[in-house]
Image (cartoon, rainbow, N blue to C red):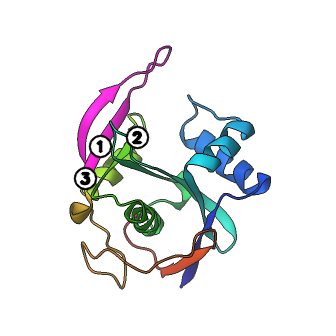
Amino acid sequence: MTELVFAPVGDEESAAAWRQVHNEIIPGAPLSLEQVVERSRVYALDLALLDGVVVGCSTVRPATDEEPVTVIVRILPQYRRRGWGTAFLAHAVRRAQELGAVSIQTIVLASNTDGWDFALRHGFVETERYTLEGDTVPYVHLAAQLADVVLAWPGVGPRALPRVPTPSGSPSSCRASGSGR
C-alpha cells in the first residue's frame, strides 16, 4: 500500500508545486505564482502527494449565482490509471459538500482526453463547450449531482461517498492501491 496525502496550498512552496502541475496539464493557460497565491485566497487549492511526491492538484470553487460548485482534479500523466484520481476526486467532493453542494461541475480541456474520459466514467455529463478568445482548443464543462458521482477504489464500494471530515488546513490521507484512475 502506498499513502496518498492531500495538502492545502498554504505557502509559496506549495503554490509553486500546484502551479507546476496546473501548467503542465493546461499548457495553453499557464498561471503565474502570483495568480495561484491569489486563487488560494478564494478557492480551495490542494495538492495530492504520493509518498511525498506531488502527483496532482485540485481546485474547488464555491458556487456563484450562475454556477454550481466547481471541482477540478488534475493528475500528472505518469500517475494516472492507478486510483489516485478517484481518491483525489473523493477528497474534492468532500470539500464541495462542506460548501453545501448538491450538484457540482468540472471543466476539462478538450484535448485532455484522459481527463474527459475520467469525468464521464465518474458520472459527469457534458453541458457546455467554449473556446476562449485566442485559443484553438475548447474547454468542456461537465456536471453531476453529488449522488451520481461514482467514487470507487479498493475498500470503498461504488457510489459510496466518504463522509469523514477533514480539518481545514490539515493534510488528510487515504490508502489506495493501483486500480481505477
> For this rendering, which residue is in front, 21 or 14?
14
Instruction: Give the number of callouts.
Output: 3
Circles 3 and 1: CB atoms closer than 8 Å: yes
Say which residue appears at 39% left-offset and 47% top-offset: 63
* Residue for badge 1: 142
Label 3: which secondary element: strand
For residue 59, above or below residue 163: above
* Residue for badge 3: 144
* Residue for badge 2: 108
Q: Position of residue 179 (x, y in %)?
A: 39, 72
The residue type indicated by label 2 comes to Val
For residue 17, above or below residue 5: above
Q: Position of residue 172 (x, y in %)?
A: 57, 76
Task: Kindly report the distance in space between the C-alpha atoms of the residues bearing marks 3 and 2.
Answer: 14 Å
Circles 1 and 2: CB atoms closer than 8 Å: yes
Region in magenta: 124-143
Say which residue appears at 58% left-offset and 79% top-offset: 3
